Image (cartoon, grey):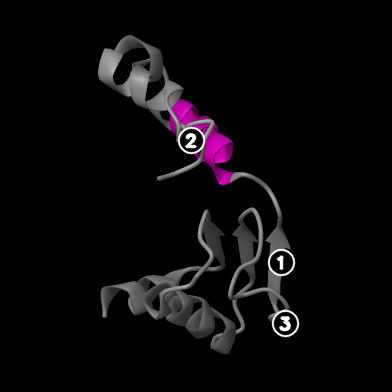
Amino acid sequence: MASFKDVENADKLLIIGTTLATYSAFRLLKHALELKKPVMLLNVGPSRADGSPGVVKIDIASGSVIRDVARIVLGSRATGDPIVAEMLRSGINVPADGPG
């Protein structure tokens, strides 16, 4: 599988914004740990990797991190392209009465 090869070719693994509830994502983390690769997880709240030796978890909202990275990578296009700019401005909006 290509994703396993990507993990094998990487020096380390950075996981952003997931609880790793699905096994398809969690198995990549397990593969990295089996290969003794450093793993960092950015996620708010509990995840399937909590307490796993070799995983450094930072409890942080990943949305702002991803937007900041996108702005850096995209440069002037982040503000010059109206569609990209709107995507970077938007986020998940939950109505006051909750999801539903």
Q: Main secondary structure of the magenta part?
A: helix
Instruction: State the image quarter where residue 92 is shown.
Output: top left
Alpha-carbon neighbours of circle 2 within 10 Å: few (<14), some, or many (≥20)? few
| Residue occupying image coordinates x 45% and y 44% | 99
Q: Which residues are magenta?
A: 62-72
Judged left or right of residue 13, residue 84 is left
The residue beneath circle 2 is: 94
In the rendered view, would you say 39 is above or below 80?
A: below
Most distant residue in the bottom direction: 34
Foreground pick, 55 / 50? 50
At numbered mark 3, what does the secondary structure look like: helix, strand or loop? loop
| Residue occupying image coordinates x 41% and y 80% | 23
At numbered mark 1, what does the secondary structure look like: helix, strand or loop? strand
Is residue 79 found inside the magenta-colored segment of the image?
no
At numbered mark 2, what does the secondary structure look like: helix, strand or loop? loop
Of the residues tagged 2 and 3, which is closer to the observer? Answer: 2
| Residue occupying image coordinates x 44% and y 21% | 89
Residue 45 placement (x, y as % from top left): 66, 58
The residue beneath circle 1 is: 56
Most distant residue in the front direction: 97
Query: Marks 1 and 2, Cα distance to the nearest angstrom?
Result: 29 Å
Residue 41 placement (x, y as % from top left): 61, 61
The residue beneath circle 3 is: 53
Of the residues tagged 1 and 2, which is closer to the observer? Answer: 2
Residue 51 placement (x, y as % from top left): 73, 78
Judged left or right of residue 30, residue 59 is right
